[in-house]
Amino acid sequence: MPAIKHRQSGAAPQIIYSDIYIPDDQDIGTGKYSIFLRPNSLSKEEISSIVFNPYFNFQISVNFHPDVHKVSVLLGKVKGNHPSSKKVYILSGNLNDSSNHEFVVTFENWQIKSLQVDGTPLAEL
């Protein structure tokens, strides 16, 4: 049961890189997805970071909505009609936007468990 690891650099101007890590390729619905944002990214327009893999029937998207201080996360199968899990988190207005930030989504059994920024959990809406 090998792990799945993939890094994508610069998918958008605001994103330094994103990492997907799934510890067991027989359990695609469990792992973590990390997004590293450049400074001043959260003071601008919306940002989306997506992993889409039809071979493993997996997709996750993290959508930053800085104008309304929210982050929405969707997790599901490519061949499904609806996400298996969907959560919205509150993006703190106190976040220092002049430095890089790491956002990490953890998921287990096709359910989103948490979203953290720089190691601090964000509150669910």
Image (cartoon, grey):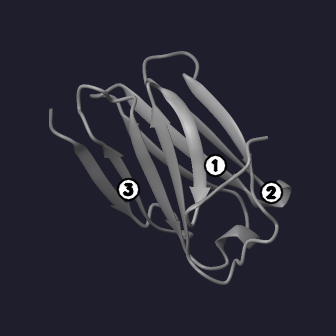
Badge 2: few (under 14), some or many (20 or more) residues near its Cα, within 10 Å? few
- Residue 44 placement: quadrant: bottom right
Q: Is residue 5 above or below residue 60?
A: below
Task: Indicate the amino acid at tag 3.
Answer: Asp
Gap in angstroms between the C-alphas marked 1 and 3: 15 Å
Residue type at mark 1? Asn
Query: For this view, does 68 lie left or right of residue 86?
Result: right
Q: Residues within 10 Å of mark 1 (few under 14, many from 20)?
A: some
Q: Quadrant of residue 72?
A: top right
- Secondary structure state at the residue bearing disc 3: strand
Q: Which residue in the structure is indicated by mark 2?
A: 69
The disc label shown at residue 28, or none: none
Residue to which mark 1 is pinned: 63
CB within 8 Å, label 1 to label 3: no
What is the quadrant of the C terminus in the image? top right
Residue drawn at point x = 30 percent, y = 27 percent: 27
Give whichever of discs 1 and 3 has the lower sequence position: 3
Location of mark 3 (residue): 19
Residue 67, given in percent of the width and then of the height, sits at: 83, 59
Residue 36 location in percent, x, y?
49, 66
Q: How many marks?
A: 3
The CA distance from mark 2 to mark 3 is: 23 Å
